[in-house]
Image: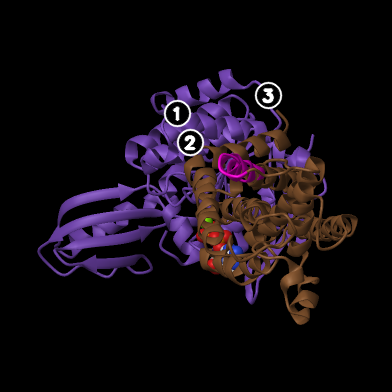
Amino acid sequence: MPPALRIEHVSKRFGGLQALDDVSLEIAEGEIFGLLGPNGAGKTTLISIIAGLARADTGSVSILGADVVRDYRVARRRLGVVPQELVFDPFFTVREALRFQSGYFGLGENAAWIDEIMHHLDLTSKADVNMRALSGGMKRRVLVAQALVHKPPVIVLDEPTAGVDVALRQGLWAFVQRLNRDGHTIVLTTHYLEEAEMLCARIAMLKSGRVVALDSTKNLLARFSGLTLRLGVAGGEPPDFGTIQCVSQPGGRLELQLDSHAQIEPVLARLREAGVQLREFEVSPPDLEQVFLRLTGHQA
Amino acid sequence: MTPFLTLLSKELLRFWKVAFQTVAAPVLTALLYLVIFAQALEAHVQVYPGIGYTVFLIPGLVMMSVLQNAFANSSSSLIQSKVTGNIVFVLLPPISYVEFFSAYVIASIVRGLSVGIGVLAVTWWFVDLPVKQPLWALSFAILGAGLLGTLGLIAGIWADKFDQLAAFQNFIIMPLTFLSGVFYSMQTLPSFWQTLSHFNPFFYMIDGFRYGFFGVSDVPVLHSLSVVAGALIVLCLFTLRLLSTGYKLRY
Ligand SMILES: Nc1ncnc2c1ncn2[C@@H]1O[C@H](COP(=O)(O)OP(=O)(O)O)[C@@H](O)[C@H]1O
Ligand SMILES: [Mg+2]
């Protein structure tokens, strides 16, 4: 069985800029895979190459074994893409847009499935409304619907929740998880790390066109990040915590980076010895934000 | 539905939904030309013996409308899709470049002919126009519209912005149409301009189309046909090549 997506040594330059540098990835059928990285890392460029919108300078991509250049008809039928930009055709209604998209994939009578997608994405009441008259969130849903008209086994979503309100974000992810349960392979990029953490079993991190990490979410969290201990203190100078990194903030707030829970007790002991009173205490578990920061040196 | 038929019907619906601007408006423009030029020149100019200037002018105006609207259709559709980004909707599906090409060009031909028929239909009310060789007229209308639809496709692929497209239209398409003999016969021109006109493919489209009405033309109709068909084939091959390499559409 070929993987859902095989990306082999893909490189792409734009003039002097190396947008992708020897990227190799394999994504198995049935995965929800996260593609993360700061702005300009090359995520959209990689997706464009997968979709045939752009061509790799070197390397190859195949979708369930079909090469996206040589065997483009088969490859494109297997792929649904939700583009990052909020694009739409102002000439048509939601239903017309979906009917055309379905026809472009060679499908004849597809009204039942189109109605079903519209129902799941809460678009039914807007079916005969012109695209121009829809809010940004609604347009985003139509983009998702357009990517699904041909029931593609592999679905790629490029920052589908950028600029979308919380309710829609949650609805969208619930829908994505449902699609995944129904057997679709999902690849997504997002800026919201907590979303990637919640949804994706495996993650690749891109930085300046290179894969800097490729692992299960669990391993990444275990490997790269410790605990964050946030304390509110009063009465006395905070002591020196030795090798533990400590940032003190105004108002008696301390933020310490720990490697494990075992370090909590010694920290508290030092505070007692120094005569410092403890007012607040909070331990945050490892999160992708820290992994991301360490690997990319960027704020997400 | 095949991908090709879907794209074709989308392109047809696109202009048909705004037919007031895309068909009715150009018909009105052509009629204004007709009223003004016919008014000014009817008494002074007779191009072919026994044919009044107004009657002479109508086929030229019809063909000019066909050509300009065929060009406008493919070029504006493409540039709009590129600028707004919705071109991805036709780049993501398994549509081959031949299907892509055919859909845009055929839609352009339909738009051009719709406008042409509109102009003819309205002028028929006022002027008694002979139609000696309707099949010749139709052939030149289809070939000419196809040629301009293809040129529009090239312009739409090449231009990144609306003003680049406008430049293409103003500096290439307009001069070639106005200097093609819509308003006059080549035979009335000084010899230098006559020679120059023979390098303008638009001249052959107008002349051949006019032959369909009057049965007379400046150059033999088969000669015009071969020039127009030759130009069309060269442009088609060129455009198919552009599309197959993904020039400016797939980066
Ligand atoms: N068509 C293009 N022409 C030139 N440079 C581009 C083009 N597309 C993307 N880039 C550049 O390539 C880099 C990667 O961009 P992109 O793939 O959009 O990143 P991301 O989606 O991760 O934010 C950026 O520096 C961007 O400016
Ligand atoms: Mg991007």
**In contact (CB < 8 Å): disc 2 and disc 1:** yes
Q: Is mark 2 within 8 Å of ligand 2?
A: no
The Cα atoms of the two marked residues, 3 and 2, are separated by: 20 Å
Residue B73, x across and y down, in percent: 60, 50
Check chain identity for marks 3 and 1: say if they share one: yes
Residue A64, x across and y down, in percent: 75, 38
The Cα atoms of the two marked residues, 3 and 1, are separated by: 22 Å
Residue A167, x across and y down, in percent: 33, 35
Please give the letter of the chain rendered in purple.
A
Q: Under tag 3, what secondary structure?
A: loop
Who is closer to the viewer here, A126 or B45? B45
Q: Earlier in the sequence, mark 2 or mark 1?
A: 1
- Disc 2 sits on a residue from what chain? A
Residue B219 is covered by the magenta coloring? no
Q: Earlier in the sequence, mark 3 or mark 1?
A: 3
Q: Colour of chain B?
A: brown
Q: Which mark is residue A121?
A: 1
Query: What amino acid type is highlighted by mark number 1?
Result: Leu
Query: What amino acid type is highlighted by mark number 3?
Result: Gly
Q: Residue at x 81, y 43 (%)?
A: B133
Q: Which residue is mark 3?
A: A108
Q: Earlier in the sequence, mark 3 or mark 2?
A: 3
Q: Which residue is mark 2?
A: A142
- Disc 3 sits on a residue from what chain? A
